[in-house]
Amino acid sequence: MQIKVIGTGCDKCTRLYQNVQQAVATLGLTADVSKVEDLVEIVKMGVMSVPALAVDGKVVSLGKVLKAEEVVKLLQKAQG
C-alpha cells in the first residue's frame, strides 16, 4: 500500500503525517508512507486544498487533518 500525505510542510500537514503513521502502526500494515511537498507535484495530482491524503494513487481526503482513527477507517476501506 502506498500512502502519500500531500502538503507544503505546514503544521497541519505534519500532524496528518503523524496520524497516518499512527494509523498504519495500529493496523500493522506494511505501507510506504511518504510526503509530497513539491508544489508542481501537488498540482499534477489535482490537489488544491492541503493537507490531503492519497492511498494507492487515489486522493481520499482534502483540506483536513484527519485523526488517526479516521485514517484507520479510510485504510481499512481501501484494503477492501
Image: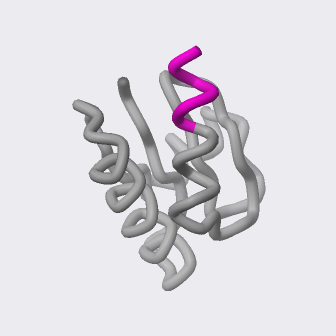
Up-down: is 63 above or below 38? below
Look at 76% across and 53% down and name the residue there: 48
Is residue 35 located in the magenta-colored stretch of the structure?
no
| In the foreground, 54 or 67 | 67
Look at 62% across and 39% down and name the residue there: 74
Q: How many marks?
A: 0
Magenta stretch prevailing secondary structure: helix
| In the foreground, 54 or 74 | 74
Q: Position of residue 22 (x, y in %)?
A: 35, 61
Up-down: is 11 above or below 52? below
Q: Residue furthest bottom?
A: 11
Look at 72% across and 66% down and name the residue there: 64
Look at 58% across and 15% down and name the residue there: 80
Q: Residue furthest top?
A: 80
Is residue 78 located in the magenta-colored stretch of the structure?
yes
Q: Position of residue 16 (x, y in %)?
A: 50, 67
Residue 9 lies in quadrant: bottom left
Check the picture and name the quadrant holding the N terminus: top left
- The magenta span reads 75-80
Q: Is residue 37 left or right of residue 52?
A: left
Q: Is residue 12 left or right of residue 2?
A: right
Q: Is residue 52 left or right of residue 1?
A: right
Q: Position of residue 58 (x, y in %)?
A: 62, 26
| In the foreground, 40 or 65 | 65
Up-down: is 45 above or below 9? above
Residue 60 lies in quadrant: top right
Up-down: is 29 above or below 68? above
Q: Position of residue 18 (x, y in %)?
A: 37, 69
Colour pattern: one colour
